[in-house]
Amino acid sequence: MTSPATSRRTRTVSQTLALLIGAVYLLIGILGFFVTGFDGFTEHDHSQTLLGFAVNPLHNIVHLLIGGLGLALWRTDSGARTYGWILAIGYGATSIYGLVVANNPDANLLNINGADNGLHIASTLAGLAIALWPRRDATGRR
């Protein structure tokens, strides 16, 4: 006979991270619209910041999409790991893009500043952690 603790499915580290990161990005996307409103969709204005991170409506929508994906994919370990790869690849590319365009108003459609670049690099690493976190079997072994 199994106890309730062993019969219930446990959440993996990858799932927990995907849920937390997805929820944070969704919240940031929503709060970003309180800073930017809905005008100036791709405006390059570093005075529009949320906690030091430059935002514009397009940037907010990207945050909403990334957050929504996390909330949609966290429920299974394979879904969470897929989300991790999406974060790693997407934010890896965004990190490179941001380093190139941070001071170029004509090319910086997402209004990326130095703080954003740091967060994008951290998000890339978090995605790798989600995607590559060691799996454990039912006995707790890797």
Image (cartoon, rainbow, N blue to C red):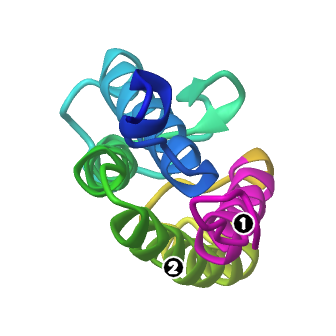
Q: Residues within 10 Å of mark 1 (few under 14, many from 20)?
A: some
Identify the residue at the far front of this view. Answer: 1
Residue beneath the point at 77% across and 45% down: 115
Is 61 positioned to the left or the right of 60 in the image?
left
Crowding at label 2, few (<14), some or many (≥20) Cα neighbours within 10 Å? many
Residue 119 included in the magenta stretch of the image: yes
5 vs 121, left or right, is left
Looking at the picture, how far across and down is residue 56, in whole percent?
39, 42
Q: Is residue 89 above or below residue 26?
A: below
| Residue 138, above or below 29 | below
- Image quarter hosting the C terminus: bottom right
Residue 21 inside the magenta-drawn segment: no
Quadrant of residue 137 within the rendered picture = bottom right
User: Residue shown at 20%/35% (left/top)?
Assistant: 39
Q: Which SS type dominates the magenta stretch? A: helix
Residue type marked 2: Trp
Residue at 64 percent across and 80 percent down: it is 92
User: Where residue 94 appears, x then y in whole percent?
Assistant: 57, 75
Three-letter residue code for mark 1: Ala
Q: Quadrant of the N terminus?
A: top left
Q: Is residue 33 left or right of residue 98?
A: left
- In magenta, the rendered stretch is 116-142
Q: Which residue is mark 2?
A: 85
| Residue identified by numbered label 1 | 129
Q: Earlier in the sequence, mark 2 or mark 1?
A: 2
Place of residue 136 in the rendered image (x, y in percent of width and height, measured from the top left): 66, 66
Quadrant in which residue 131 is drawn: bottom right
